[in-house]
């Protein structure tokens, strides 16, 4: 999946709620054995780095807890 930013493509950052839902979706897909890739392309103002770090932190916490934290 490739995420370009919303509502303004390449500029906008994603909300905490969106990142949490994305982490849940990735976790569910990974648990089925699927290889999962997520690419943030909302790079103009640096949002991609921030969003990727948020997603990585949340996903790591969920995996460590062995649950689908909300």
Image (spheres, helix red, strand yellow):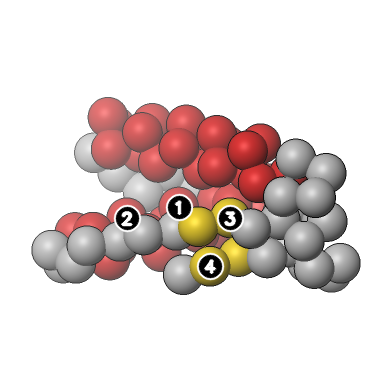
56 to the left or right of 10: left
| Residue 67 in the image, given as x and y percentages of width and height | 30, 43
Q: Nearer the viewer, mark 3 or mark 1?
A: 3
At x 53%, y 67%, the residue is 2
Q: Residue at label 1?
A: 23
Q: Earlier in the sequence, mark 1 or mark 4?
A: 4
Q: Considering the numbered disc 3 on the image, is that residue within a helix, a strand or a loop?
A: strand
State how far apart marks 1 and 4 are (Cα): 14 Å
Q: Is residue 1 above or below residue 22?
A: below
Location of mark 3 (residue)? 40
Residues at marks 2 and 1 touching, judged by CB atoms closer than 8 Å = yes
Q: Earlier in the sequence, mark 2 or mark 4?
A: 4
* Of 6 and 45, the residue lying toward us: 45
How far is disc 2 from disc 4 in space, using C-alphas? 17 Å
In terms of secondary structure, where does tag 2 sit?
Answer: helix
Residue pointed to by mark 2: 27
The residue located at (55%, 34%) in the rendering is: 53
The Cα atoms of the two marked residues, 3 and 1, are separated by 13 Å
Where residue 27 sits: x, y (%)?
32, 55
What is the quadrant of residue 11 in the picture?
bottom right
Residue 32 in the image: state x and y as whole percent. Answer: 16, 67
Q: Which residue is the site of mark 4?
A: 2
**Residue count near mark 3 (Cα–Cα under 10 Å), binned few <14, some 14–19, many ≥20:** some
Q: Dot 4: within a 10 Å radius of its alpha carbon, few (fewer than 14), some, or many (20 or more) residues? A: few
Residue 38 in which image quadrant: bottom left
Q: CA distance from mark 2 to mark 1?
A: 6 Å
């Amino acid at each position: 999946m490739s995420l370009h930013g919303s509502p303004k493509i390449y500029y906008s950052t994603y909300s905490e709620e969106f990142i949490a839902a994305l982490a849940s979706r990735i976790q569910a897909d990974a648990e089925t054995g699927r290889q999962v890739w997520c690419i943030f392309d909302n790079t103009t103002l640096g949002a991609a780095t921030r969003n990727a770090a948020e997603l990585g932190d949340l996903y790591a916490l969920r995996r460590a807890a062995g649950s689908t934290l909300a």
